Amino acid sequence: MRILLGTEGVNPQKPDNYGDTPLSCAARSGCEGVVKMLLEQEGVNPDSLNNAGRTLLSRASQQGHEGVVKILLELEGANPDTPDNDGRTPLWHAARDGHEEVLGILLERGDAKPDNPNDDGGIPLSYIAEFGREGAVNVLPVRQEFNPDKPDNYGNTPLSVAAQGGHEGVVKMLLGRDEVNPEKPDNDGDTPLSCDAWGGSEGVVKILLEREGISPDTPNNAGRTPLLHAACNAHAGVVKILLKQEDVNPNKADDDGQTPLMYAVRHGNQRVIELLQPHQLVTQGALSVLADTTPYK
């Protein structure tokens, strides 16, 4: 690097086809010594963006390079909240990839907003929850302006994505926050329990059902209940748990008139059929026309 930087005609700010400069490449690779060396060069812009609109801080945060992040934050005008072309901030990138130390460093600044959404409306906590990163959940601060129940553009909350992913530890953490609504539906009307029934995690279903005020039979906008989701996706364990709940109606049809048993028969889910049949009011004649019913979407 020293030889190259001392060579006439070498441009330390020259970008590649993706708009990444040598400094950006060094930040992405975590080369602290090279980053310092390049920052000392005349004409090097520490605020340069690549073609995706990512700052040096975003590149370093995404890869979890703590040392480079600290160096960059010491620069005058460093902004931990600068979004890229998709609205993703350095904090968002660090959260997405579970870099707890970098998260902590960025949040120490005080001016990094922990619930800045990307263009899809997803906040950093949503992506931490999606991948079940329990340690990263603990790093996020308890600030007055921080909303751990903030939905994305599709109505998905951190709790609903954690539930669908079957991440029991994260679900427990989120349920421990007073601001989190365990019955908050997404844009399709699916509650966290419904999302988990679709995903099939028995452990999360049990955790949610232990929470007071959660209805095990709430239908979504298409009239589909958690039991119907579980039956369609062959989650026999979840079906068994839900059938034990007093408030669950195993014969409850969706807006197309289809019951959980009908979907189980159509998809050939034998174990689920065995669990549902003792509870059904479906006649043999109804079962014979299942092949002509509307597919589950």
Image: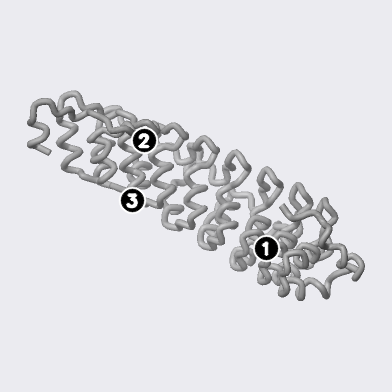
Q: Residues within 10 Å of mark 1 (few under 14, many from 20)?
A: some
Q: Amino acid at mark 1?
A: Asn
Q: Earlier in the sequence, mark 2 or mark 1?
A: 2
Q: Where is residue 215? Give x, y as percent.
A: 73, 58
In this view, the mark in front (2 or 1) = 1
Viewer-nearest residue: 17 or 249: 17
Q: Which residue is mark 2?
A: 80
Q: Amino acid at mark 3?
A: Glu
Q: Which residue is mark 1?
A: 233
Q: Earlier in the sequence, mark 2 or mark 3?
A: 2
Query: Which disc is residue 101 wearing?
Result: 3
Q: Is residue 21 left or right of residue 224?
A: left
- Disc 2 + disc 1, Cβ < 8 Å: no
- At a point 17% along the width and 27% down the height, the residue shown is 11
Q: Where is residue 198? Give x, y as percent.
A: 65, 59
Question: Disc 2 and disc 3: Cα gap in Å?
Answer: 15 Å
- At a point 75% along the width and 69% down the height, the residue shown is 243
Q: Residues within 10 Å of mark 2 (few under 14, many from 20)?
A: many
The quarter holding residue 121 reads top right
Question: Disc 3 and disc 1: Cα gap in Å?
Answer: 38 Å
Q: Amino acid at mark 2?
A: Pro
Q: How is the image coloured?
A: one colour
Q: Is 253 rendered above or below residue 46?
A: below
Q: The N terminus is located in which quarter?
A: top left
Q: Where is residue 33? Give x, y as percent.
A: 16, 42
Q: Where is residue 100? Give x, y as percent.
A: 37, 52
Local secondary structure at mark 2: loop
Viewer-nearest residue: 287 or 134: 287
Q: Earlier in the sequence, mark 3 or mark 1?
A: 3
Question: Disc 2 and disc 1: Cα gap in Å?
Answer: 42 Å
